[in-house]
Image: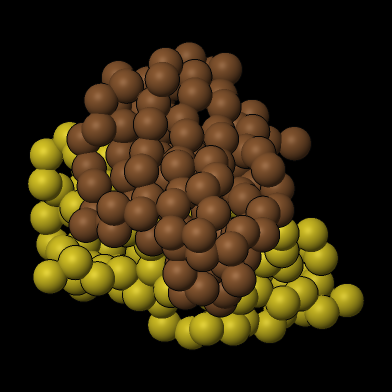
Chain colours: A yellow, B brown
Amino acid sequence: GESVGLHLPTLSVQEGDNSIINCAYSNSASDYFIWYKQESGKGPQFIIDIRSNMDKRQGQRVTVLLNKTVKHLSLQIAATQPGDSAVYFCAETPFSGNTGKLIFGQGTTLQVKP
Amino acid sequence: DTEVTQTPKHLVMGMTNKKSLKCEQHMGHRAMYWYKQKAKKPPELMFVYSYEKLSINESVPSRFSPECPNSSLLNLHLHALQPEDSALYLCASSVKLNSPLHFGNGTRLTVT
């Protein structure tokens, strides 16, 4: 079935440390994954994406890792800052044709302690 | 500021009212979306439009009626809503299907 979930609802890290947010998905045919950040009172903001033909993709201070063997996705944030505090969602596009259907996971709240 | 503009930001309506939510983007995107988000929950897909044609309706009740008058505009017409329809309604657009979505900041809807 279609299911995207995260391992922990809340992650608390010290400012300056690295953060790792995990996500499990169940549809082995999924071919496109996106991480979004949602701050209070705002819509989700695109962070980084990865397609199933890649294992790793890097952006500015962020890295996404995809392990298709165990159907696991992670978002790594380097040198976490107070402005990184938000809810992070992984999202998956199941391979069911070019439908535009995007399924969100439950979300992890990242709290950055000063 | 987001490049997807939603109006109004807040809306309070009674169960017998008719209202509309509006969404606008000028990025030349050809796919547009409506999502519903309850507090502390992920966004849930409602509708997808591609090239002004409805391509996905996620079994949304008929009291929600989407409309895409042109490639820049997306409306959501509301009629006879229930209190449980109170939520944040998010609009998004993308260059095409299966490319990153750009979200607006939503309309906070309260049904009394």
Regarding residue A50, the answer to whether it shows in the image is no
Residue at the location (45% across, 62% down)? Answer: B81
* Residue at the outermost right position: A114
Residue at the location (61% across, 49% down)? Answer: B106
Can you give x and y, in whole percent of width and height, for residue A61 in the image? 65, 51
Image quarter of the C terminus of chain B? bottom right
Q: Where A113 sits versus B97, above or below?
A: below
Residue A110 found in image quarter: bottom right
Observer-nearest of B88 and B64: B64
Relative to residue A69, is residue A104 drawn left or right?
right
Regarding residue B112, the answer to whether it shows in the image is yes
Can you give x and y, in whole percent of width and height, for residue B76 in the image? 45, 41
Observer-nearest of A110 and B43: B43
Relative to residue A23, is residue A31 drawn left or right?
left
Can you give x and y, in whole percent of width and height, for residue A27 in the image? 16, 64
Relative to residue B91, is residue B112 drawn left or right?
right
